[in-house]
Image (spheres, rainbow, N blue to C red):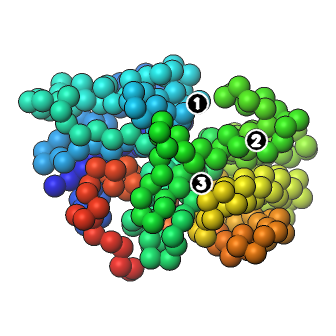
Amino acid sequence: MTALAIDIGGTKFAVAVVHPDGTMIRRAELPVGPDPVATLASLVRDAGAAGLTGVGIGSAGPIDALAGTVSPVNIPSWRDFPLVDTVRELLADLHDLPDPHGFPVALAGDGQCMALGEWWRGGHGSASQVMLGIVVSTGVGGGLVLDGVPYLGPTGNAGHIGHIAIDPHGDLCPCGAVGCLETIASGPNTVRWALANGWTCPAAHPDAKALAADAARGVPVAQLAFQRTADALAAAILTTAALFDVDDVVIGGGVAAAGETLLAPLRQAVAKQAGLGFLKRLTVSRTSLERDAGLYGAAALVLPSEERTPYRGP
């Protein structure tokens, strides 16, 4: 019994075959490229289909889990794209499945899968009742796990924290709204603000990794950029925590690779902005599964909970 896990990001796709005991095999990833379907086909072909229980997909959103479609903000060619049917067709074409339309394929947001993966394999399942996972990368996604069960909502978009309005007078978001968290806290937008405020990138291509390195070295404008992102994230976290009584927050994604450069000001901002007593108990940590959290969560969508081996520590 294994699951094929697929992670659809704004700039890369990843797949892995995952066993119920948490063993991950045949992991691979590729840049999205000019033809996202061809990229996906290549990864699915190489993963294999022998012994699969089902396919779990975590995708950048928004998604429509009922229809099996996705409209990732950062993949303009995919609008109401039939991802679930496409995956079934790819499996049928590449692996000669007898009944691909009856094959279990589950779809959830990438942030929700990241949160579920951290709950299952990241060591958070025994420490929290309500966990919020946030992916800070090309965009900002999120997901909620309530007592071990991902809360997806009727359309599969629950926890889409990147599109909480932080600044009603802010920038226009690609989603069509104004002042979304993503317009401030995503990697590209953090870098954009730093460049507009005088940051001179020492690398050929300015990105969040170079900005984080400068912030760690004490470059003031780089530090201010991360402080601005941390303040926006704190506001969104506390808004979500006030609604769902969250006790554990896990931050993943490429920007989270900055480590304490992001987490230290984020924890300070959460502590400063938290007013109600129950909000003060929040813990904020960085993903322990790095880039694999979303793949574990996607696999968990189709691996029965009674079959999945809980994380027992190193």
Q: Quadrant of residue 284?
A: bottom right
Q: Amino acid at mark 1?
A: Asn
| Numbered-mark total | 3
Query: Whole-percent x and y of residue 190?
Result: 76, 45
Residue at the left extreme, as displayed = 98
Residue 225 picture location, percent across and down: 82, 52
Relative to 53, is 238 above or below?
Answer: below
Question: Which numbered circle lies on residue 126?
Answer: none
Q: CA distance from mark 2 to mark 3?
A: 16 Å
Residue 17: tell me if it is visible: no
Instruction: Please say if 212 is above or below 206.
Output: below
Q: Are marks 1 and 3 in contact (CB under 8 Å)?
A: no
Residue 6 visible here: yes
Q: What is the C-alpha distance between the residues marked 1 and 2?
A: 19 Å
Q: At x 84% / y 42%, what residue is drawn?
A: 167
Amino acid under label 3? Ile
Badge 1: residue crowd in 10 Å (few <14, some 14–19, many ≥20):
some
Q: Can you give x and y, in whole percent of width and height, for residue 143 in the image?
A: 54, 52
Between disc 1 and disc 2, whose residue precedes?
1
Q: Mark 2 belongs to which amino acid?
A: Ala
Quadrant of the rendering where the C terminus is positioned: bottom left
Q: Residues within 10 Å of mark 3 (few under 14, many from 20)?
A: many
Query: Of the residues tagged 2 and 3, which is closer to the observer?
Result: 2
Helix, strand or loop at label 2? It is loop
Dot 1 or dot 3, earlier in sequence: 1
Q: Residue at x 42, y 59 (%)?
A: 149
Name the residue at 34% across, 50% down.
301
Q: Which residue is mark 3?
A: 134
Query: For mark 1, what is the residue?
Result: 74
Q: Secondary structure at mark 3?
A: strand
- Kindly identify which residue carries mark 2: 165
